[in-house]
Amino acid sequence: MLKKRNAFFSFTTILLLLLLGSFLTGCNIPKAGPTAVPTLELDADPTSAPTVEEIAYTPTLPPLKVWLTLGSNGNSGICDLFRAALVTPELSFVQVEEVENLTPSMITADKKLVVFCGMPENLEEFTAVSGESVYAVVGNENRNLPNLWTIGYDPANELFMAGYFLGLTANDWRGSGMLPSDSALYGETASEIFSNGMHYFCGRCQSVSPPYIVFPQNVMLPESASPAEWISGMDQVSSSFPNTWYISASAETLEVLSVMLEKQHAVITSGEKPEGWQGNWLGSVHVDLKGAFTQLLQRVDNGESPTVIIPELKVITGIQASLFNEGKKRNMEAVYSNLIKGLVSPYSPVPPASFQP
């Protein structure tokens, strides 16, 4: 009887221990936690990540202040070319004020460039004014004065070189020019100066075959003349049988060029080859005053010391190398150099008073 009790007690004890163990094991079952969020892997240290760059503002430089004035002995055509030179993006830094009847007392002490469209008689009075201003004159005289820029230019030089070009190329000297009679730049002596250029090359320039004519035979009309008027003027000199023409900018129109093509005349211009025209273009000649103005303004703005600027003679060879080639072009450049040096004059000689009646 005692053994049965002991066996029952042992069985009960083991059963209780098994149940207790199962309970304790159930309490230790791991519970599922929240799904872990993956972290971003950075290729570089976050502290070295690029930042938004600040915009670097370049401080605006003050414009170049320019006073433009005709001045005594001035040429309004030169002023027109100065204004034309400003119509380029590269000169957007220039601020121009036109001043009439400028006197030395009107010059202020601030920094500016005073441009005279000529060579004023009282130039010394201007350059003697104290202040930061510098001056620029246009003329063929080199004045050794303080703070003075000089552009070595004479409007007559361009017409003289155009006439010389005509003498180099016209067959039997039979050349003519279409020239303005009222040009602000060239004045009333345009035909005379043009003829002087041709005569400088060929002397009397009389044709060697009939009709015996002294050339050039020029057509002179106002700048406002219509193409029909220029063509009519050309017809009036047709009896001298010109074969080569210099056409100034005021006469250069498609209508005039069409007649030149029809008559098979050779043509010289003051600019590039006429666009779309298929005629006999010998080339062009031009003194680049606008380019000299551009150079002046840029050099003054850079703070360079005053000096003399010589405008470039631009000569372009056309389609007939047999009539106008590189050798003749170099010849023209040599003549222009002598004009600048004063060794050649575009004007008709005036005898001294002692030789006059």
Image: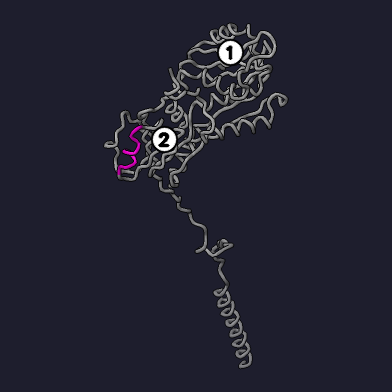
What type is the residue that disc 2 sits on? Val
Identity of the residue furthest to the right in this view: 322
Residue 125: horizontal and vertical position, in percent? 31, 38
Towards the viewer: 214 or 4: 214
Which residue in the structure is indicated by mark 2? 137
Mark linked to residue 3? none
Dot 2 and dot 1 residues touching (CB under 8 Å): no
Side (left or right) of 132 relative to 157:
left
Residue 126: horizontal and vertical position, in percent? 32, 38
Taking 295 as reference, is 354 above or below it? above
Residue 325: horizontal and vertical position, in percent? 69, 29
Report the residue at 60% width, 34% height from top: 334
Which residue in the structure is indicated by mark 1? 217
Magenta residue span = 121-129
Label 2 secondary element: strand
Residue 290: horizontal and vertical position, in percent? 49, 32
Based on the displayed image, in which of its 4 quarters is residue 214 positioned?
top right
Real-space CA distance between mark 2 and mark 1, rounded to the nearest whole angstrom: 35 Å
What type is the residue that disc 1 sits on? Gln
